[in-house]
Image: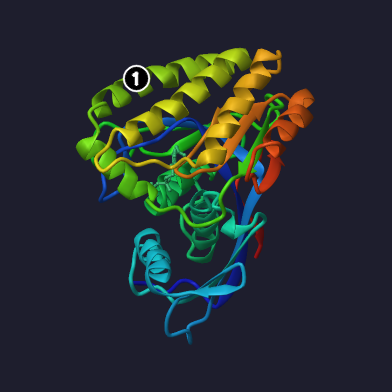
Amino acid sequence: GSRESADCQVKAEAHANIALVKYWGKRSLEKNLAATGSISLTLDALKTETEIRIDSSFQKDYFELDGKPVSGEGLKRISDFLDIIVGTEERDRAYITSKNSFPTAAGLASSASGFAALTIAAAKVWNKPTDRSILSSLARRGSGSAARSIFGGFVEMKSGKDLSGSEDYAATLYGKDYWDLRVVIGITDATPKKIGSTEGMERSRKTAPYYDSWITSTEQDLEGMRDALAKRDFTQMGELAEHSALKMHGLAMSARPAILYWNAATLESIHKIRDLRKRGIEAYITIDAGPQIKVLCKPADIEDVQQALTSVTGLQKVITSGIGDDAKVTEV
Ligand code: 2P0
């Protein structure tokens, strides 16, 4: 392969995202193709900054996350990803340092912002196309949700018909200033999750009796969410987001062996938010492949939501986020 890249250094940033219509299931593991589309909100409070240095003298890749060197499987995942997206194993080895704006140990998904930032930086270093659909497709090879974190605002990830992956990328539906929403995140457990997303999705596909209806009903949810966003209808958006999350967890619980991501504080948080709604404060929960709780609310209701979460037994930390921007190169 050609070694067009001279020794250089590039920095990029990307934000995590929270799915309003969840992605849970793959139609192909090989190219990481989702079985359905998904719709997400990019979160400005959860940012990853990644720097790549290449130097023809480096003998192997090095990866450091929040100041700690990563070895073994963690490093291999990064190296394999670079091999896939750079398109040659003859690429120069890279010295990669990555930093999260949120506590890495908080158990918040960092693969979305992490692989999105790495994709943007790597595309710059190795002179890859700057077309954002292509960047999103590349990020998908690292993590499905990373394809969405290439974009800011309200984002839709498409799922194609065939196994080529040519249609499997995300795009912005509405920019970050379209609708001022907030997400209040409650950390209930800071230890790494027990069942990774890929494993959880595959077990659900193979053993959960509701899997087929999950797929067909998610197609309807995508339509409903596009409609809710077009109208800026908070109730329709929130109810549907909460439904998609609870349905995903119901599916996971119906797998064998069962996948149960919640702890006691997760469940208490759900009830606290339902109580808020009874008092007329509109807020809706969503939960990813872990025990943390995320609450969708309007800016005026942030304090009530924060208070409700803070009163939950065992809740460790509350982070409030607005809507984030596109992933981008920040230093060359
Ligand atoms: C989502 N999640 O739509 C869903 C809901 C978690 C729960 O996408 O296997 O790390 O790397 O493509 O993107 C998290 O899974 O999974 C995720 P892979 P990813 O946000």
Q: In which quarter of the image is residue 61?
A: bottom left
Q: Examine the rendering and report whether any part of residue 154 can be seen.
A: no
Ligand 1 lies in quarter: top left
Q: Which residue is identified by label 1? A: 217
Residue at 47 percent across and 53 percent down: it is 129
* Residue 23 in the figure: left or right of residue 201: right
Residue at 50 percent across and 19 percent down: it is 240
Circle 1: residue type: Ser
Question: Is 297 drawn above or below residue 122 in the view shown?
Answer: above
Pinpoint residue 172: horizontal percent, then vertical percent.
55, 32
Image quadrant occupied by the N terminus: bottom left
Circle 1: element type? helix
User: How many numbered marks, from 0 up?
Assistant: 1
Viewer-side residue, 264 vs 246: 264
* Residue 2 in the figure: left or right of residue 120: left
Pinpoint residue 78: horizontal percent, then vertical percent.
42, 65
Pinpoint residue 139: horizontal percent, then vertical percent.
44, 50
Image quadrant occupied by the C terminus: bottom right
Residue at 55 percent across and 60 percent down: it is 121
Disc 1 crowd, CA 10 A, few/some/many (<14, 14-19, 20+)? some
Q: In which quarter of the image is residue 311?
A: top right
Question: Is 166 drawn above or below residue 227 in the view shown?
Answer: below
Pinpoint residue 69: horizontal percent, then vertical percent.
53, 75
Viewer-side residue, 3 vs 58: 58
Q: Examine the rendering and report whether any part of residue 290 can be seen.
A: yes
